[in-house]
Amino acid sequence: MDGNVVILTHYLESFTYIGLFFILFICGLGAPIPEEITLVIGGYLAYQGFTQYPQTVLTGLIGVMVGDLTLFYIGNRWGTELVNHHRLNWIFTKKRMAKAQAYLRKYGKRTIFIARFLSGIRSGVYLTVGALKMDLFDFFKMDLLAALLSVPLLISIGYYFGGHIDNIMIVIHKSNRLFLALIAIVVVMITSVYLLKRYKKNQKLEG
């Protein structure tokens, strides 16, 4: 296994449930530790007999949800001050904020659900919807629904296929890199289209 994964595995072996909760909590806050790998290792510990499968799933759910709700609260509590800061007015214009609010009202719930499965952008989405004052119950409901699918699935992979943990980690690493590459491509494409439209608009105004 990768050196960092080995360190994480030894840490979780030593602190079991408390360690798993803590790592997932800081993952939710945006710490550069892959949540998916942490959950798979949690299942692997149950496979080895360090923990029990049901308790591991419950700990995983609690850790994930507490981290997500904390990040949402941070966005909700301090996000408005950041958005309204005079030095950032050129980014968070009233027009853009109005569009963001409209998007959130229309697609907010499904965005939260989908973001739970996207490790590269999850933290940013949750912080943003908190800053945009999304309803707490709607956030909790959709995040919990997604977590009830993703957390048991990832822990089960480590538990039922623990004998192939090295191969599992390789697959996860490759899939994460592929996803980040796809995100980068999409961002570049969206930015290029936006700049092109803006350029054409300015050309028409000048003409």
Image (tube, rainbow, N blue to C red):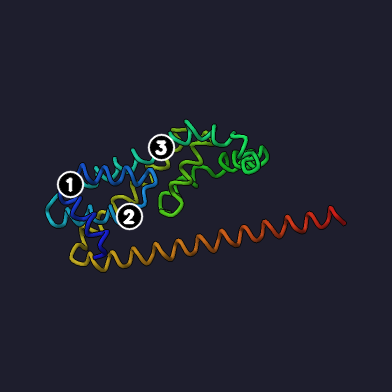
- Amino acid found under the numbered disc labelled 2: Glu
Reply above or below: 102 against 191: above
SS assignment at label 3:
helix
Count of labels shown?
Answer: 3
Report the residue that reaches farthest toward the right: 207
Mark before the other along the chain sequence, 3 or 2: 2
Q: Residue at x 47, y 46 (%)?
A: 124
Q: Position of residue 206 (x, y in %)?
A: 85, 54
Q: Is residue 56 left or right of residue 199?
A: left
* Disc assigned to residue 140: 3
Residue at 28% across / 52% down in the picture? 39
User: What's the residue type where badge 1 is placed?
Assistant: Thr
Q: Which mark is residue 36?
A: 2
Q: Is residue 23 above or below residue 164?
A: above
Label 1 to label 2: alpha-carbon separation = 17 Å
- Judge from the rendering whether residue 201 lies leftward or rightward of residue 176; answer left or right: right
Give the class, few, some or many, for how many residues have Cα within 10 Å of label 3's Cα (few <14, many ≥20). some
Q: Nearer the viewer, residue 154 or 202?
A: 202
Q: Secondary structure at mark 1?
A: helix
In the picture, the quarter occupied by the N terminus is bottom left
Classify residue 69 by image quadrant: top left
Q: Which mark is residue 42?
A: none
The mark nearer the N terminus, 1 or 3, is 1
Secondary structure type for disc 2 = helix
Q: Disc 3 marks which amino acid? A: Phe
The image quadrant that residue 156 belongs to is: bottom left
Using a 10 Å C-alpha cutoff, classify the residue at mark 2 as few (fewer than 14 neighbours), some (14 to 19) or many (20 or more). Answer: many
